[in-house]
Image (cartoon, helix red, strand yellow):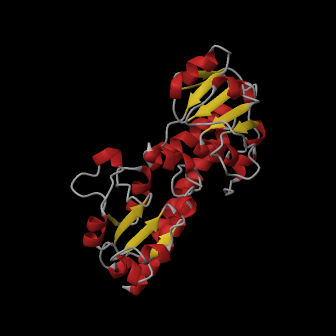
Amino acid sequence: MIVLLLVLTGCASHPRDEDSAAGPDTEASFPVTIGSVTIDRQPARIVSLSPSATETLFALAAGPQVVAVDSQSDYPEQAPHTPLSALRPDPEAIAAYHPDLVVASADTTGLSAALARTGVKTLIMPDAKTLDEAYGEFVQLGKATGHQAEGESLARQTRADLDKIVADTPKPAKPLSFYWELDQTYYSATSRTFIGQVLARFNLTNIADGNNPSISGGYPQLSAERILQADPALIFLADSKCCGQNAQSVAARPGWNTLTAVKQGQVLALDDDIASRWSPRVVELARAVSAAVTKAAHAG
């Protein structure tokens, strides 16, 4: 539950090429089938119950079709924010927005069946576990909303941007170790998670991996002793907005002022949202990681 909350609460415009400027060809695009859901016509009223999906919908130029988003969908600013809950979705409250398509990250409490009784289609877009899954969901959301060209363009552009950022990042003489903090109780993310795979592109060593990167679904709880013993060269804080963590608060923890990352000023407070979502803003995360690795490589 802690990890689910972190993913849901995790708080850019994305460049689009000429292909994405074209409007949707609804006659050619519909009906479309995504998984087990067939969408007969371009949805005009979309409710998003997934912060990552909300960001992606707006990046696809499907924003004008979105009539409501859940309480944790705080980006972009113009999204129609509501009190709707993604953790405990209320079919009646959702139906009040008269959607013809609902996008959610999970079929919580039988949401799809409940909405189907009112004639509303529900598209489940699970949290991406890999970058390829994220690119695939960009394309799927594009198809589902009548923006297939935009979805394909967004996937290509995001992949190209990430590849360039990684290629342009200096390679340290030896792999740098890092600690990724989800909260102050030392929950972390291994290389088997979406975020872990993004960081692995930079040839970093994840201290949370241990002997089994799949442990606890990829989100193990570490101990202060283990972190101190591992002495990471980099510390990434994905709990800066939620919990007020920063370089100063980390240095004040007992014994943490001895860590290499603290002594060399390599504690990076990230935007919690960008650090936890599979949206196109993963490019911003990669830029932040690249800057930290570049600084450490030059220091070394």
* Residue in the foreground of this view, choosing between 150 and 203: 203
Q: Is residue 61 above or below residue 86?
A: below
Residue found 72% across the figure and 52% down from its top: 18
Q: Is residue 190 visible?
A: yes
Residue lying furthest left: 211
* Residue in the foreground of this view, choosing between 177 and 16: 177
Indicate left or right for 59 with 238 as reference. Answer: right
Q: Position of residue 294 (x, y in %)?
A: 46, 77
Which quarter of the image is occupied by the N terminus? top left
Residue found 33% across the figure and 52% down from its top: 220
* Residue in the foreground of this view, choosing between 4 and 32: 4
Q: Is residue 195 above or below residue 96?
A: below
Quarter assignment of residue 66: top right
Indicate left or right for 20 with 183 as reference. Answer: right
Which quarter of the image is occupied by the C terminus? bottom left
Q: Is residue 113 above or below residue 151?
A: above
Q: Is residue 35 visible?
A: no
Q: Position of residue 202 (x, y in %)?
A: 40, 66
The number of numbered badges drawn on the structure is 0
Residue found 49% across the figure and 41% down from its top: 127
Residue lying furthest top: 117
Q: Position of residue 3 (x, y in %)?
A: 44, 47
Q: Position of residue 34 (x, y in %)?
A: 56, 27
Quarter assignment of residue 229: bottom left
Indicate left or right for 246 with 214 as reference. Answer: right
Q: Is residue 150 above or below residue 244?
A: above
Residue lying furthest bottom: 299
